[in-house]
Image: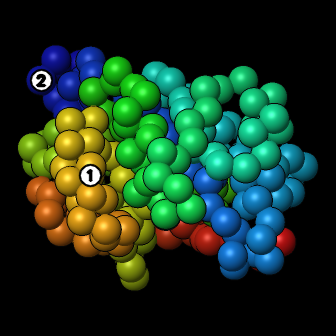
Amino acid sequence: MNGSTPHAIMMAMKTVGIILSGGQGTRVDGADKGLLPWRKTTRIESVISALRPQVDCLLISCNRNIDRYSTLGYPLVQDQLPGFQGPLAGIAAALERTECDVAVVVPCDCPEPAADLAMRLVDALESHGAQLSYAHDGNRNQYLFTAMRVACLESLHDYLATGQRSVQGWHRVLDCIAVDFSDRAADFSNFNSP
């Protein structure tokens, strides 16, 4: 493979996978979504199985049930901002803990992310010279399925310091590219029931 192709560039960069499992579970009666059953395992374990082969290392963002998550064998990060301030707080905490070049973020709500999710997101990030790429499932933007340069952390800190918490709002201040995943729309099915 020619060393200048986007896939070759991606392979040369170190990529961390960040799994978001730190919310309050308000749409699932307060349950910890990552620990809810999925097929013969849990949602978090299903996401790990899908994402781990696609990245160099993994971090799990969680704010509850730390003892249970620690049995999974991956580093855990907790929000530095108090009071469950949303997914951006979890992303910021994880970016602070990595020495990788690029982060691929996946929420635990969707337990079966595409097997080529990271490759497609990072390829788009590199080929467009963007700061962040996110999935579009053919009908809607999937703002929490993203690849971003870890250098975006400074922008994220600035955004959070204003009191804003909207993922879409933060994307608006970055150079972003949407990536067409209409061929994999089912992979973004969101399961918000216990």
SS for callout 1 = helix
Going by the numbered disc 1, the residue's amino acid type is Leu
Q: Is residue 11 visible?
A: no
With 7 as the anchor, is 115 left or right in this view?
right
**188 versus 53 height, above or below:** below
Residue in the picture at 90% in, 49% down: 40
Examine the image and state in which quarter residue 162 appears. Answer: bottom left
Residue at image mark 1: 156
**In the orientation shown, which residue stands out farthest toward the right?**
40
Residue type, numbered disc 2: Ser
Vertical relation: 79 (above or below) 164 = above
Question: For mark 2, what is the residue?
Answer: 4
Q: CA distance from mark 2 to mark 1?
A: 30 Å
Image coordinates of residue 158 in percent, x first then y, are 20, 53
Depth check: 122 or 168 in front?
Answer: 168
Which quadrant is the C terminus positioned in? bottom right
Between 45 and 93, which is closer to the camera in this rendering? 93
- Rendering coords of residue 123 (x, y %): 25, 41
Left or right: where 101 falls relative to 108: left
When the figure is inspected, residue 2 is found, relative to residue 61, above or below; the finding is above
Neighbour tally class for label 1: few under 14, some 14-19, many 20 plus, Cα within 10 Å: many
Please state which of the two labelled residues, at mark 2 or mark 1, is closer to the viewer.
1
- Which mark is first along the chain, 1 or 2? 2
